[in-house]
Structure formats: C-alpha cells, structure tokens
Amino acid sequence: MAESRDDSSSSSSSSSQQDVENDGNNENRIKFRDLPAKKKVKVASRTVALLVGLLGLLYIFVCSLSLMGSAFQLLGGKQAGETLSNSSLFNNPVAALVLGVLVTVLLQSSSTTTSIIISMTASEILQVKQAIFMVMGANIGTSVTNTIVSMTQITSRDEFRLAFSGATVHDVFNFLTALTLLPVEAVSGYLLHLSTAIVDSWHLDSSNKGTQQELLKAITKPLTNRVVQIDKKPLQLIAEGKLNATDAQLLKQYCSSFTRRLDNCTVTAVLSTGPPAVANVSNVTTSPTIASEAVTVATSAVQDSLTNYTLNALDETCLREEQVPCDYLFHGSSLPESAVGAILLVWSLVMLCVSLVLMVKVLTRLLRGQLSKSAKSTVNADFPGRAAVLTGYFAILIGAGLTMLVQSSSVFTSSLTPLVGLGIIDLERMYPLTLGANIGTTITGMLAGLASSNVELAMKVAMAHLFFNITGILLFYPIPPLRRIPLRAARFLGATTAKYRWFAIAYLIILFLVCPGIIFGLSLAGWRVLLGVGLPILIAICLIVAINVLQKKHPHVLPKQLRSWSFLPEWLKSLKPYDRVFRETARQCRCCRDQGYDTEEGSSYENSTSSTPAEDDHKLGLSRQTTVTLCTESSV
C-alpha cells in the first residue's frame, strides 16, 4: 500500500510538473504583444522577480567565493607564507612554478599570490626571473576555482558534462601554456628580456606610487566584512622573512585609527645654544601650533638667535593615535584561526552550492522555449561574412574588459560556468572568453606593482605575467589545429566525468595537489633527481598520446599489437575497476543511492570521448525534462 501511494504521489507530482512546463512553453510560443493585459502584467512581474532573484543569487555567489578565499587563507596562508620565505627554493624554475600552483590553490586567489610575489620582488627578496616562474604557477592555480564551481551541477549528468568541459578548458590552456613557455623561459629568458625592455623604456619613478582600486569588493565588502576580515599584511611579512608564522595573526583586530588630542602636554625645544626650553601647551590642535608656541617660549627663555632647533617626542606627548577594533562575526572569538577557517570553508561551500543550484533553476525558468534559443543564438553568434573570423578575438576583448572590471578571473569564469552547463554558452565561445579573463586578471598585478615600494621591479613581473598570457593566446588560439587541442581535451574530460562522476574530485586532487607536491619534492632533491624521474615519465606520456592519435588516424602505421590497448590489464586501460570500488562505496550512502548513482546511467557515455555542439543540445534537452534535486531533498 505504501509503495502504491508513493507511486501515485510521484506520478501526480510529475504530471503536475509537466503541466507547469507545458503552460510555460505555451506562454513562450505566444508573442508577448498578443497576450491579454492581465497576462502581460503577470508575465512581466514574474520576469522582473526572477531577474531580481538572479541578481541576488549572483551577489551571494560572489560573496561565497570571497569567503572561501578567506577560509583557505586562514587554513593554509601561514604555511604558504613560510614556504615563500625560503628564497633558495626559487632557484629551480620547476620548483618555483609548482610552488606558485600550490600557494595559489591554498590561498584560492591568484591576485593575492601575484601581489605577494610582486611585493617580494619590489623588496628585492626575489629576483625578477624567479618571480616570473612563480607567476606562471599562479596562473595555473587560479583555474581550480571554476572547476570546483562546475561540481555544483553534478546532479544532472549532461549539465555536469558541459559545465566541467567549460571549466577545464581554462585548466588545459594554462597547463599547455606553462609547459610550453617554462623551458623557453629557462633557456632564453624571453619574458624577462621583453618585460625589462618595455619597463626600462617607461623611465618609471619609484617615488610616485599608485594605489590599488577595488571595484567588485566595494560591493561585496558590506556583507563579507560583517562575517570575517583578513589582514593580508602578515602574509607578506612572513613571505619576506620579517615575521614568524607562529606569531602572525590573520584575523584583523583593528580596522581604523584616529589621532586623539591631549588636553595638556609638554613640548621640549632643543636650541642650538643654551639649555633645552620646555613649553607647556594646552588645548593643542595641530603640530604647527605646538611648534610655534614652543619656539616662542624658548626665545623668551634664552636670549639668542635660533639657528637650529628640533622638537622632541611631539607625537608621543601631544598627539596620540588610537586604534578602533573591528566589528565582525568572528572578531574576538576564542577559536583558533584554523577552526574559524574550517567553519568558513563549510559555510562558503554551502552558500556556493545553494546559490548556484538556485541560479541554474532561475536561469532555466527565464531562458526556456524561444527565449532560450534567442539567448543562445545571440551569445554564440558570429559576425557576418568574412568578419566571422574576428568573433573569437572580440570575445577575448569582452572577457578581458569584464575581468578588469571585477578584478578577478575566478569570479568571471565561475559565473560563466553554470551558463555553459545549461547550454547557453558553447564551449567554442567559452574558450576565448576564458583567454580574455587571463589577460584581464593581470590588471591586479599591475595595480599591485604601481603601489609597491619599487615600481620598476614590480612592473617587470606584472608585464611578464601579461605577456605570458598573450604568448599563450598567440600559440593556442589563432592556429586552428592548436586551438582544437584545449577544446578536445576539455570535451574528453567532460565526457569522462559524465561517465564517472567521482573522476572530477580525483582530477582536482591529483592535478592540483598530488602532482605539484611530488614534482616540488623531487625538485628539492636536485635537478638530477627531477630529470632522472621526470624525464622517463614525460617521454612515456608523449608516447602514449602519440600512439592514441595514430590508433585513431593511421592505425596501419603501428605494429599489429599496438593498434589497440587490448593486451593491457583492465586497470591500466580503463577506469572501470576504480569505478566499481566507488560504486560499492556509494551503495552504503542512502543519499547517493537515492540519486541513482549506482545505476548504469553512464552506459550512453561508454564509447564517447567527445561530442559536437548539436549533440550537446540534444542531450541537454533530454536532461532538462528532469528536475535538479538536492541530496537533502532526496533523503527526505
């Protein structure tokens, strides 16, 4: 009886949902101007409400990214600063690059990493050549954020496939660019010489420092500053070796200060001849008043010409600086900073997941039917005629401009990732937008350079960061065969995660933590050890890639045994054995079982490693007939 009631309730709910969808589709088929007046008001009101809700969710999403960055700084900021303080590690280019990756993953902010690197270079703790390799690593580490964001669409297999492809195209491009330019820079110093020549031609004056401008943070700070405030100065001091990590306090204690006037104070004027003259000054307002009154008293006391005098203890005796404590949720907490960071991390991840899931639902309701087709055709449209080849370059400019506006490539690309998952933005359009974001994010480094103590050295690092990204674009975008490499790799990763959803977590851990950690450890042992271990692995990877290409393109060239991988054991040629382990583990979790994880939904992806945009649209249209259900809703 219970099962029949459940079946009837589920069928009634599905039918009611279908009725709602049909009503929405019918409304979309009828043009707005043909609707009755009451219907127009209803549709317009609902659209405005959805748009307002979408903006609110976007605001929460950006704030959650900021809080997640603060959480990672509390959890790993001191360790990252201590690692950066060991400047002897940076003499090895490989160690410097993977260190940039690890530090950026820990801080969850390439802007913070590059700002620290630029400050250390301006303080002459790092050489410009060393800093360039670290900035390359920071460029890789920043792409982990939108990969994490794509996992919020894991409940819908097809949306997850598209979203993960849209996120990892950023990863693939950054890895390819770094792997290509690392040996070139180590041998020739291409970026070092180019940035030095450009900055030297500017004849910068280090005494004229700029200030960093905050655009997006001016909007998010009213909320995030009520939760937590991080003092980034200790991170820089730890990295420069001026502060012990155990004594550092990252939670900001004082947020502002003011100068308080003392009612009565004493000023001592030291004269060129004669004893010091003491002036008792009351109701002091400004230091010039103190100086004039002290000189008057001194002149009357000592009948001599004042050729030279100084004022002792002026600030300490007459003007006192008072600090104002901060006011936020975790201020004065008895919890250790690591515990606060763990709480913030869980909190921010919940905010991130909930806001993104709701954003996807709102966008699905807004962009459905004819409106969805119009939005997709507009976003992914090419310029007419021969100008179509310029569309991608225009998208790069758009991505660079918007990223300059928000001053965060992570925020920009993470905001686009759900749209890729919904099929609104194609992977071919996401790719140039991501490339533009890589250029736009360098503006943060330039602002940090202009505000540093040595503008010339700092700007050399910032310009090297800019031309690193420009060179990568020139290598992997204008030439079609090279342009297809990141796109195909991203589609392959998306298809793999659609088939084995645990692969996304394994991908993040292995690619951004395990591999950089192993390479960093080998590089510490010396270049001979790194070369002896790394070179055979690199040669093996290149051979496997070459054989895979030949198996698909020209199998007759290969020996008969190498035309397929059938001779290898299953655990070397397939992820199925590992998937069985994860499925067995997933069966123990009711939530995962309710989501259907242990079913064979992935059979359609068995032989699929890539798909065309048309196939993406077809699969996504089928997946949108189901409702995205949260794990908690399923368990209830």
Image (cartoon, rainbow, N blue to C red):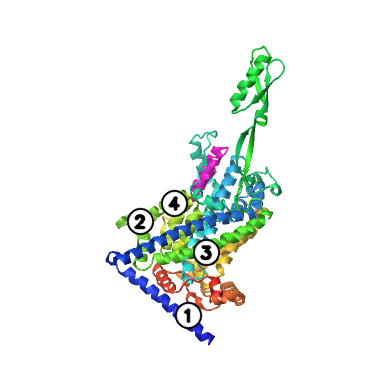
Q: Is residue 447 magenta?
A: yes
Residue occupying the point 37% across, 74% down: 22
Cβ atoms under marks 3 and 1 closer than 8 Å: no
Would you say the residues marked 1 and 4 are in contact, meaning their CB atoms lie under 8 Å apart? no
Residue 618 percent location from the top left of the image: 40, 72
Callout 1: SS: helix
Among the two numbered marks 3 and 2 on one chain, the one whose residue lies closer to the N terminus: 3
How packed is label 4: few (under 14 Cα within 10 Å), some, or many (20 or more)?
Answer: some
Q: Bounds of the magenta span?
A: 442-471
Tell me the number on the disc at residue 354. 3
> Which mark identifies residue 389?
2
Q: Is residue 567 visible?
A: no
Instruction: Tell me the amino acid under the disc marked 2.
Output: Val
Q: Amino acid at mark 1?
A: Ser
Distance Cα–Cα, label 1 vs label 4: 45 Å
Alpha carbon distance from label 2 to label 4: 22 Å
Give the CA separation, mark 4 to mark 3: 25 Å
